[in-house]
Amino acid sequence: MATYDGAATLPAVLDACCRLDPPDQRWQILIVDNGSTDGTAGLIARYADRLPLRCLSEPRRGKNVALNLALETLLREPAGAGDLLVFTDDDATPERDWLRQWEACARDHPDYAVFGGAIVADWATPPPAWLERLAPVGLTYGLTAPSLPDGPLFPGLVWGANMAVRRAVFDAGHRFDTAVGPNGQGYAMGGETELTRRLALAGYRVWHCGAARVAHHIRAHQIKTSYVLKKAWRFGRGKYRQDRPGMFPELLGMPRWMLSRYLLECARLVRDAARRDRDGVFRRRWEMAFLQGYFYEASKGQRNNKNRKNILVTSYSGELGGMELRMAQEVRYLQAAGYDSGLAMRRFGGVEAWRQRLAAEQIGLAEYDPPLFFEQWEWRRLNLWRARLLAGGRLRAFRADLVHVAFCWTNYGASVLWLARHVRVPAVISVHNAFQPTSFNAWHQPLLRHAFGGVRGIYAVSESAMTHFMALYQPYIAPSTRLAVIPNSVDIRRFRPSAALRLAARRRLGLPEDALVIGSVGRLSEQKQPGAALAMLAMLRRAFPNLYLVLAGIGPLEADVRRQCDRMGLTAYVIFTGFVPAVEELLPALDVHLLLSRNEGFGISTIEAMACGVPAVATDVPGSSDILRGSEGGILIPNGDMKNAVPMVAALLIDPERRAVMGSKGRAEVERRYSEEVVGKLVRRFYDGLV
């Protein structure tokens, strides 16, 4: 812990430490006196014979400066097995079993490196009724909600009064940011959350341990309105530092919506004051103080991680599908590699729910919908001028060092690529489909030459996708452009063979115990040919009357497929699940997974099924053939030829032993070629030297 003039609160904390049940490991307390003038050093010395206590002195003010000194001191010593660094404050009193709970938590969750504990309030005087009703006390005082369950935790909810981090994290070079946190002045909040959020972006996992508990002392002056509003101002400052640039359209370097929100809060404050609504007045003042802190920091233009390179991942997108999921995975890879990265794309159905899920992972999704002069022929000249005059400035606001443009089809994404070149930001391209042959007319050709002039690298998700892309764009690609094939990946920890998941999923779906189940995970669209799956089910049921089909996904053909199902008399044997957020809990229920697409860039659902030990069947088209040709985890069937395809699937259904072997070999293949670790290395290698 760091302490500054802590003589008033340290005795209670150190007395509690004297009563601690010692953990099984050797332990010590390291206190950094951060320039105290109230006799703190002498007070600490009086406990030297009662505790395994060390005291350092750091005269430079700043809690994070002091903590970094402690880290440098500790890291010069040899590491022990499972070393855990537990951080607390000079006004946080631990419970008797505190260290034993931390020791057990770290032991029971070896895959986690950052831990947040429970923090309850120790009020010096009873708080006024309005405080807990109106103020965000968790944020203001660094408290943990009693209802917060043990489990994976958002890193922004780990508070410095009670957190633990494995020593290996700091051995890897991570330190506290000395520009934020308490420093004796009007500081920006976020001393510990800046670190924990940065560690989460680097791939370290965060866990909440409610049993490791401290009581945070809250002084009498800290329950006054002026103090609470000052914390709101500091929170606003810290929020600006951790926000990504360009997430929203800006004016004077600040999000336009925040400026309008401030004016609205001013008007509401006048209204509530006129009504003598004291609760309303406080709420308006808190919101305005937060915004004022944000504006203050924005006026200085200071953000954290100013030296980190910023890569913006964007595209033309119309729905949430495989390409969009891969774009989000790209951001995860980039953040883990030390880049600052986020997503930007146009609005589409379901994007808000997806945005919220991504926000929980600290992945920003900004709205960006530039005029389309490649993808849309109508109004192309007007849209080109609009792009030049308006959309370029919006793209600059992201302050990107590199723009990653994902191509889902032919020229879908080319407008953004041209804009990146227009604002002089280099670009890379990812190719997510095997494009059909086409030609570019005299309107497109000079624009393409301009757009590709800034492209430093291109990768495709399959050899087929790269071959088709080069057939279209070879004349525009510079010889020095880096080319690579990087497949999609699968989280092999989430997607895994599981008898328990298989049984649970089948029960949820209402399937008979002896049912044979084929299924398809994908959009109900023309590309995926869900009608072909129905036709295959009808033909197979002649030999397998206990056969069912599961269609997981939504799309424009859903109503048509349901009507086709009724006409064929298959309603009782087809299960429409709709969108399934946790596909890994559904796939183990299948005996065979089908992907009957007419074209693919790379069939993500195919490798997800293989990861779950489910044999994969796909039509022999580019993208799917790249995965299954030569694979022992599945088979390719002819596209549009049910007469020959159905017997091939029937041979699988009749032979459970063959399915088991195929499932086992498919899992091994995914671990070897498509795991996030393997693909992540390929992504990092691709970007190396391009930014």
Image (cartoon, rainbow, N blue to C red):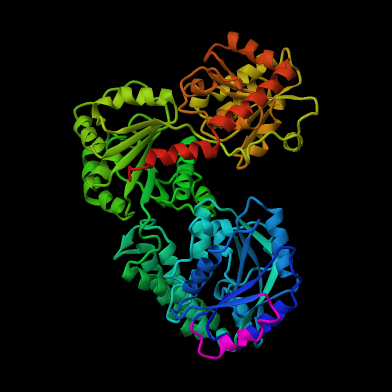
Q: In the rendering, at what x and y percent does residue 209 appear?
A: 68, 62
Give the residue drawn at x 49%, y 77%: 231
Give the residue drawn at x 54%, y 32%: 674
Q: In the rendering, at what x and y percent does residue 399 appear?
A: 32, 54
Q: Nearer the viewer, residue 178 or 245?
A: 178
Majority secondary structure of the magenta segment?
A: loop
Is residue 562 placed above or below 296 in the rendered structure? above
- Name the residue at the bottom extreme: 38
Can residue 99 be seen here? The reply is yes
In the displayed structure, does residue 103 sit left or right of residue 633? right
Quarter of image, res 437 = top left
Which region shows up in magenta? 35-52
Is residue 429 placed above or below 664 in the rendered structure? below
Can residue 321 be seen here? The reply is no
Is residue 403 placed above or below 281 in the rendered structure? above
User: Which quarter of the image is occupied by the N terminus?
Assistant: bottom right
Q: Is residue 682 magenta?
A: no
- Name the residue at the top extreme: 643
Is residue 266 placed above or below 75 in the rendered structure? below
Q: Nearer the viewer, residue 477 or 387?
A: 477
Q: In the rendering, at what x and y percent does residue 196 appear?
A: 53, 61
Q: Is residue 38 magenta?
A: yes
Give the residue drawn at x 26%, y 53%: 393
In the displayed structure, does residue 500 sit left or right of residue 277? right
Please give the count of numbered marks on the rendered protein: 0
Quarter of image, res 683 = top left
Q: In the rendering, at what x and y percent does residue 167 appear?
A: 58, 59
Give the residue drawn at x 45%, y 48%: 337
Quarter of image, res 307 = bottom left
Q: Nearer the viewer, residue 139 or 155?
A: 155
